[in-house]
Every structure is written in C-alpha cells, then in structure tokens.
Image: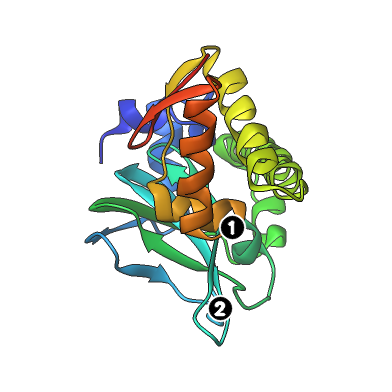
Amino acid sequence: MDLPVLCRTVLFKGMTEDEVSCALLSLQAKTKDAKKGRALLHAGDFTDDLGLVLAGSVTIEGHDVWGNRVILGHVVSGEIFAEAYALLDEPLQVDVIANEDCRVLFLHLGSAKALAGCTASWASKFTANLLTVASRKNLHLAGRSFHTAPKTVRGRVMSYLNAVSLQAQSRDFTIPFDRQQLADYLNVERTALSKELGKMQKDGLIKTKKNHFLIL
C-alpha cells in the first residue's frame, strides 16, 4: 500500500504514515480491481465497508425495474463511496459501477460505535475526516437537486455547467460524463440533450466537443 499517497487523501488527512498503517490494519483494509462496467456494489446489498477509489473512477447509479438509469454521482481517485451504508444497517439503494478500469480500497467500518470506542490516535482524525467528506457529499447531492429542478433541458444543462465552471474556476473545462451519462445525471433523454447542446452552440452560449466545454 502506498502510504504517502493515502496520506494525501481527504480520508487520511493529517495522519502520519504510522497512523495510516494502524488504521488500515484496524479497518481490515483490502483492495479490489474492477473492469469498466463491472459492479462493485449492488442495490439491495448490505455492506460494512466504505470504498476509497485508488485509481480510475466509479459512478453511483440508480436503476428501476423498467431498466431506467439515473446517475447520482461520480467518484474519482481519492474520493469515497458507501460510507453511509457502512455505518448504518440499511440496504443499498444504488449500484456502484466502475466507470473505467479501477482499483478500490475497502475499509470495514461495521458501526459508528466501533469507531467511537477506539482510543487510538488515528481514530479521532479518521472520524473527523469522514464527517468532512460526508458533509461535502451532502452539498453535492443538494447541488444535483438544483440541476434537475429546471423544467427545460437548457435550464438543467446551464445549471450543471455553471456549477462545474465555478468548481473548476474556469469557463474551459472537462466534465466526467459522456453524453448518455450526462443525460442520465440530468434526468433527460439523450436525444433531447444532444439537440439542446447543438442549439446552445448555435446560439453562441457554449462550444463543446465530446465531454469538453467552453462557456462563451
């Protein structure tokens, strides 16, 4: 395990390499590789583990019984997923899918009580970092609700691109989704999305090629 790399992740921020080693041992750390398109976790599963993406990326997806997909999030290297389910005895309501070939570190949380009862120096830092990550993810989910609130496709696209631009601190940026994934994330039809992007380019609002955008 590359301890210096782990020390730079949000989850292990502020820890020494020795503390990270102790945390990995105590949390029964294990790694898993997954090819693009493979599921790491399925809706309906129970898990005691959170996942930390070490390489590649994963998407958090919701599927209904009719086969419709909604993308709820995109998790890149250094970020985590399934932490809420690892702390609560609740079945997953989403699938976690490898967005590309990836490697994930799984950490066994079991319950919040187990962490709270640990007196090791790494435990308080880990808990504080976990709370920070969870808070940021809540903001992200709230942001998605803003993107899907507009009634028009253009309104949803503009809301999303504005948010990404602010985060990137640039009008020139690349998004993590292809066209179908962006449509699923914004909860619109792909054909309607492609048509609207074409109109927005014609109207001089944006320039786009694949997943690269420039806001004019």
Q: Residues within 10 Å of mark 1 (few under 14, many from 20)?
A: some
> Does label 2 or label 1 sit earlier along the sequence?
2
Q: Residues within 10 Å of mark 2 (few under 14, many from 20)?
A: some
In the image, residue 10 sits, relative to residue 170, either above or below, namely below
Residue placed at 56% from the left, 78% from the top?
46
Residue placed at 63% from the left, 28% from the top?
163
From the viewer's perspective, is 26 left or right of 158?
Answer: left
Q: Position of residue 113 (x, y in %)?
A: 72, 60
Q: Secondary structure at mark 1?
A: loop
Three-letter amino acid code at disc 1? Val
Q: CA distance from mark 2 to mark 1?
A: 30 Å
* Residue at the spot of label 1: 188
Q: Position of residue 5 (x, y in %)?
A: 33, 28
* Residue at the spot of label 2: 46
In the image, residue 70 sits, relative to residue 161, either above or below, namely below
Q: Quadrant of the N terminus?
A: top left
Q: Report which quarter residue 162 is drawn in.
A: top right
Residue placed at 50% from the left, 23% from the top?
206
Q: Does the rendering let one see residue 188?
A: yes
Q: Nearer the viewer, residue 171 or 39?
A: 171
> Which of the two marks, 2 or 1, is nearer to us in this view?
1
Q: Position of residue 98 (x, y in %)?
A: 33, 58
Colour scheme of the rendered structure: rainbow
Numbered circle sitting on residue 51: none
Q: Secondary structure at mark 2?
A: loop
From the viewer's perspective, is 152 left or right of 157?
Answer: right
Q: Does the rendering let one see residue 49?
A: no
Three-letter amino acid code at disc 2? Phe
Q: Position of residue 156 (x, y in %)?
A: 66, 42
Q: Report which quarter residue 133 is drawn in.
A: top right
Residue placed at 62% from the left, 66% from the top?
85
